[in-house]
Amino acid sequence: METESGVPTPAPREKFAPEEAAPVREPQFWEIRYKNKDTGWDLGAAAPPLAEFFTKNNSSRPPARVLVPGCGRGHDALFLAKLGFDVVAVDFTNQALAALRHLRRNLWIPPEKCKTARADVLHLPARFHASFDLIVEETCFCAIDPTLRDLYVAMARDVLVPGGRIVALLYPFREGTEGPPFPMTEREVESRFGRDFEIEHCEIPGNSVEKRRGEERLFVMRRRGEPVVKA
Ligand SMILES: C[S@@+](CC[C@H](N)C(=O)[O-])C[C@H]1O[C@@H](n2cnc3c(N)ncnc32)[C@H](O)[C@@H]1O
């Protein structure tokens, strides 16, 4: 179409640009949110319930190998690396991982203490199989299309050694289906994870950030199966 002056007018903008219309399971959905600084989940630091858990808890100590799925800008991953864990932080957006690497440099954390991998957490490389003692997660499970949640559980089972644990700060526990963040219930978490994981602990943290207060749960789940005893 042209105006009277002969200057072409741009085609009317669609309500959503193609990348904004990408489904939540695609990296583009998240890339556009990083590009638009629409990242309200980002606390700018490790989540207080996770920070407290790892500062006080003796059962999960460095130098355990930790996977942080859907790591975003990496505040939890870098916090764990600073505590001495060997961390692999996974996300499928370039902007999240670039931000993590920038923060890692600023914090003087050696890259080998907090490695990054650009991958879909539901389809991790075979080399991740049985490679981790811990999974630490915050607002990744709720970012996954709910119809794919069983794939997430299967991933957790696959990458952990028998006896390995998930320490998950899950959110939001409320009614509804709209997301992300996609809501969940305690019963759903227990039933999805319960076959492969023993639920060791579930609490409503007292130190959630204000906007999540009462809607978070800190779960600790142990992968079933006996740990392999090294000779
Ligand atoms: C709500 S944000 C949480 C980020 C971070 N855990 C935090 O709490 O700051 C979800 C993150 O998971 C990533 N993500 C979502 N689905 C993913 C998938 N299937 N594979 C890898 N990363 C994924 C997104 O790119 C985004 O960085």
Image (cartoon, helix red, strand yellow):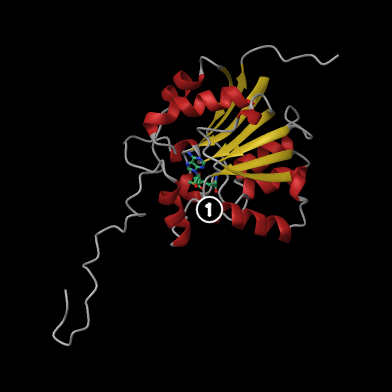
Q: Which of the two residues, 85 or 12, is positioned nearer the viewer here?
A: 12
- Quarter containing the N terminus: bottom left
Task: Indicate the quadrant where residue 226 lies.
Answer: top right
At which x and y percent is residue 52? 67, 41
Task: Indicate the quadrant where residue 70 lies.
Answer: top right
Residue occupying the far bottom of the picture: 5
At which x and y percent is residue 81? 73, 44
Determine the residue positioned at 31% across, 59% down.
Answer: 17
At which x and y percent is residue 160? 64, 25
Q: Is residue 144 above or below residue 164?
A: below
Q: How many tags in the picture?
A: 1
Q: Which kind of residue does numbered mark 1 sit on?
A: Asp
Q: Is the CB–ligand 1 distance for label 1 below 8 Å?
A: yes
Q: Is label 1 in a helix, a strand or a loop?
A: loop
Can residue 109 be seen?
yes
Residue occupying the far front of the picture: 6
Residue 20 located left or right of residue 33? left
Residue 207 located left or right of residue 191? right
- Quarter containing the C terminus: top right
Instruction: Provide the residue designation for mark 1.
Output: 42
Q: Is residue 35 above or below residue 168?
A: below
Can residue 201 be seen?
no
Residue occupying the far top of the picture: 226
Residue 112 located left or right of residue 223? right
Task: Indicate the quadrant where residue 146 lies.
Answer: top left
